[in-house]
Image (cartoon, rainbow, N blue to C red):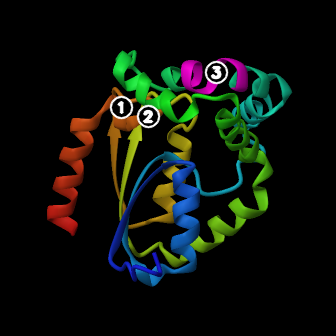
Amino acid sequence: MQKLDLRKITLFCHDWGCPIGLGLAGRQPERFRGFVIGNTFAWSVNGNLKLEAFSRLLGGAMGGFLIRNFNAFVNLILPLGMQHPPHRTVMQHYRRPFSTRASREVNRIFAWEILGSRPFLEQVHQGVSQLAHKLTLILWGARNPAFTRQQCLRFEQLFPNSQTVILPNAGHFIAEDAPAQIVEQFRFWWQVKG
């Protein structure tokens, strides 16, 4: 970003991409124009029993075994976050980066770090205050098993000038469940706000 001197960035972020991206944006807010936020978090989730259980189960020994040996994150968790069974070719693309046991370890680490990255997530949350005035579109899957309307409302509080669109037939992976709606909403938002 610095080497290319990127500016006027509109960041589309989802899942772990959001705390990573917003963490960067909070440290360099002058480079960012706005955000499109979907089904994610930007704060410590310690105390959220559902996410704590997910982190401990998939990030722990049993989850690690299932992820490394059976690619369980891609083969089981990913489809559970979608409202429609993904096409075989879509799943091939998700599996391709995780073709070896060693390459799958990152999925276990991401799950574990939901709880393990508390200091980082607290820094991200503090940095979001630098971004509250930025253009923000929140796209939220109404059938998301991981991040509920409560997390969406929290983003609305963090970004008081945001526009929220609830995607009624989308689960966690909104880009898979509602791609046409996302493009349509983004274009409309960009024409009006951008």
SS class, disc 3: helix
90 relative to 44 in the view: left or right: left
Q: Which mark is residue 55?
A: none
Res. 26 in view: yes
The question of residue 73 being in magenta is answered with: yes
Residue 63: x and y in percent read 76, 25
Q: Which mark is residue 176?
A: 1
Kind of residue at disc 2:
Phe
Corner quadrant of residue 19: bottom right
Question: In the image, which residues are magenta?
Answer: 68-77
Pick out the residue farthest to the right. 61
Residue 44: x and y in percent read 71, 54
Residue bearing mark 2: 173
Kind of residue at disc 1:
Glu
* Predominant SS of the magenta segment: helix
SS class, disc 1: helix
Residue 145: x and y in percent read 55, 28
Corner quadrant of residue 91: top left
Q: Quadrant of the N terminus?
A: bottom left
Residue bearing mark 3: 72
Q: CA distance from mark 3 to mark 2?
A: 17 Å
The question of residue 132 being in magenta is answered with: no
Q: CA distance from mark 3 to mark 1?
A: 19 Å
Marks 2 & 1, CB-CB < 8 Å contact: yes
> Against 146, is 132 above or below?
below
